[in-house]
Amino acid sequence: MKKSEFQAEKLIILFYFIINLCTFIIITSSSIYIGDPAGEYYTVPLDIAIILFISNTAIYYLLYLIYRCCVSHIAFHNEVIIKRIETLLFLGVTIALLGFFWIDYGRAEYQSTSPFGFVFRLIPYSVIWLLYVSINSKWNAKSIFLIVYYVAAKIIMGWSGILLALFWVLFIKYYSAKKRSFLFMCMCMTLLVILYFSAPIVYYLKYYIRYAGQFEFNYPVLLSKLTARLSTIQNVLYIYQNTNVFTNLYNKYLFDGFYFIEPITSILPRALLGISATNFETIYVNIVTGEFNPGVIFYLGLFGKLLAYFNTGIYNFGNFFIVTFVLLGGLFILLKLNFKKAANPFIFYTIIQFALSGSIEELSYTLYGICLVLIFCKIRFGIHNENRY
């Protein structure tokens, strides 16, 4: 194994550790939460909070170790497959834009009630776009257009997280191209910190577009919102502090075994079939805001999700582990066998995003997107025969 390998991934893990550590220090020293439960008062004993922080950090490192063991080191390049992915990406973004302009489908903080809105998400264009950025090795006018086309579409819809996804994938893809010095690593970490404190400006532009100009610039609030998306410790502490509330709402609105159905509901036409959109994420929104809003999601983080399920019983806790293992395992196998080393940035971003969200629905939709790409490209799962193309 080359020393230059995984340098970018290590820096990203370090970045999230620093963000979580700073968040933890602010909360425990001020007794006020930041992020999604902003303004709520913190009452968790410090010794327990430290244990929760260490456990939450261990989740990130564990996923990193799993990633190192599972990734491929074999080069990949197939022009035909990439061209087919480009076609599917363009088609997916175009269909999504039609749904957005027609019935507001895909708009941030908005849950469509149209029974046929699912048509506009049959092609998981966000998954396809990120995979394309990861495996594409030749940049030309067409590839740049597709990237800009997707980014513009998401910004119009009121989303900005795709910019972070793009940055991380490109960072992993090109940073580890050769061995870097320790000084250069420190410079990169400094740059990441600068970008972090500059990001509220991007957040302001997002909310300005989302609310049609009816949004005032407030740097502390925007930084708090950004922190809610980049750290998870505040959610872990909040879940521990409100264990009974989470458990009671779980028993009221959900049921044991819900996690087995959630991967399926991520791709089903819920409005058409009358399937509830309630899950742990929307329960979290209800606890913080006092109402259910399916268009708004507060992610618990993977460790927070495990903690929440543990509080509902060891049976749920164990089964959630099984579902997570199956989905991540299936995703790793398909990407490693079919896209080899080129898919590594995509895989790492996916597991980091899963650590941040803990969302089974999001993870299963990613797996569905990869399966759709493979079917569209006419690849037999895990079998390559370049002469066929």
Image (cartoon, rainbow, N blue to C red):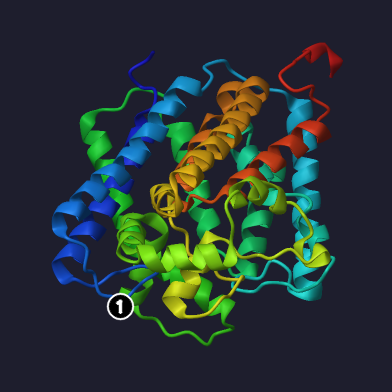
Residue 336 place in picture, x, y as percent:
60, 23
Residue, x 76% and y 60% (percent of image)?
96
Vertical position of residue 128 compared to residue 311: above or below: above
Give left or right: position of 185 versus 250: left
Quarter assignment of residue 222: bottom left
Vertical position of residue 135 compared to residue 386: above or below: below
| Residue behind mark 1 | 39
Quarter assignment of residue 9: top left
Residue 381 place in picture, x, y as percent:
74, 23
Give left or right: position of 191 versus 122: left
Residue, x 81% and y 63% (percent of image)?
273
In front here: 44 or 366?
A: 44
Residue, x 48% and y 36% (percent of image)?
348
Identity of the amino acid at label 1? Gly
Say if residue 201 shows up in the picture. yes
In front here: 154 or 311?
A: 311
- Of the 4 image quadrants, the one containing the C terminus is top right
